[in-house]
Amino acid sequence: MHEPPTRPAALPWRDHVPLLLELASGLAITIATIEALRRGLAAPPGMQYGAGLIYVAMAFVILRTFPDRWLGWANRITLLRVALVAVMTGTLWFPEFLEQHATAMVVLALTILLLDGVDGWVARRTHSASAFGARFDMEIDAVFIVVLCAALLVLDKVGPWVLVIGAMRYAFIAAGWRWAWLRVELPDSRRRKVVCVWQIVTLLTCLLPDVDHSLTSLLAGLVLLLLLASFAIDVRWLATESKRTRSN
């Protein structure tokens, strides 16, 4: 989950129209979900604007990086995750609502997590797995982790240091701009996948109302230590690989 993103060659603008329609459907899902929250949980007015802006920003990135005209079913499920992550992000501007309906937000976050397994399963069953699909899925995981960290901070369940968990991957990417050896593609790693899932499950658990401040700090601290160890292993591998390449 640590590799910096790559950008494929851009399509002519007219070829983006089918993809734009798919992205527009995701925006409709975002707005519809917010409307359901407004009707069912009395979500405050204005939440749809924050969620909509977040979705549009993520959709713009997809539009700029997707190498084909159509998303395909696996990527459409990932797009659904984008919409739900945007909805959850929209709640961050309304701490009272987030605190009052923390359990509902945990259900929403759990849905996002479960869909993370569905899109991969669909990609394998439909033989549509691709480098972009894997990257797309990974980037949404990264954004989701940032949102979960921010939610814990907004709920005042842990200090600002929790944002380090969400920022570490982006710091790694930024370091790669400075040191080229950090941009070498890492081999596939089950450890990295397990750490990613562990982060999300732990942060999601910390959102539960019954998990108090001290337990949240302990669990989030363990996540941070585990993440630091995972990054350290990858950086060491990259440094060793860089030395081996220079010596040949």
Image (cartoon, rainbow, N blue to C red):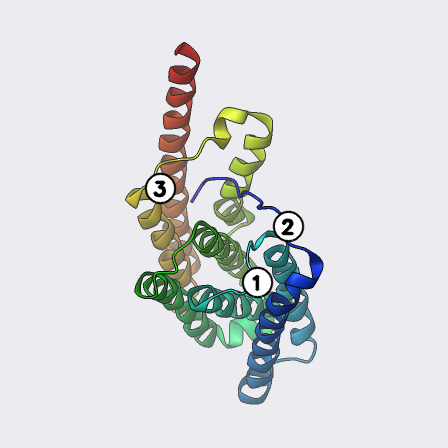
Name the amino acid type tagged 3: Leu
- 83 and 15: which one is in front? 15
Query: What whole-number distance in Å separates the C-alpha atoms at marks 2 and 1?
Result: 11 Å
Residue 182 % position (x, y)? 49, 29
Task: Give above or below for 172 relative to 61.
Answer: above
Query: What kind of element bears circle 2?
Result: loop
User: Is tag 1's residue or tag 3's residue first in the polypeptide sequence?
Assistant: 1
From the image, tell me which residue sits under label 2: 10
Residue 13's quadrant in the figure?
A: bottom right
In the rendered structure, find residue 60 and report the number of the disc placed on it.
Answer: none
Residue 103 % position (x, y)? 43, 74
- 43 and 50: which one is in front? 50
Name the amino acid type tagged 2: Ala
Query: What kind of element bears circle 1?
Result: loop
Which residue is located at x 41 percent, y 17 percent? 245
Residue 19 % position (x, y)? 60, 66
As drawn, the residue found furthest toward the top would be: 247
Residue 4 % position (x, y)? 52, 40
Q: Are marks 1 and 3 in contact (CB under 8 Å)?
A: no
Residue 120's quadrant in the figure?
A: bottom left
In the rendered structure, find residue 226 and report the number of the disc placed on it.
Answer: 3
From the image, tell me which residue sits under label 1: 69
Q: Are marks 3 and 2 in contact (CB under 8 Å)?
A: no
- 77 and 179: which one is in front? 77
User: Which one is closest to the eye, mark 1 or mark 3?
Assistant: 1
Neighbours of disc 3 within 10 Å: few (<14), some (14-19), many (20+): some
Name the side, left or right, on which 90 lies relative to 106: right
Query: What whole-number distance in Å separates the C-alpha atoms at marks 3 and 2?
Result: 37 Å
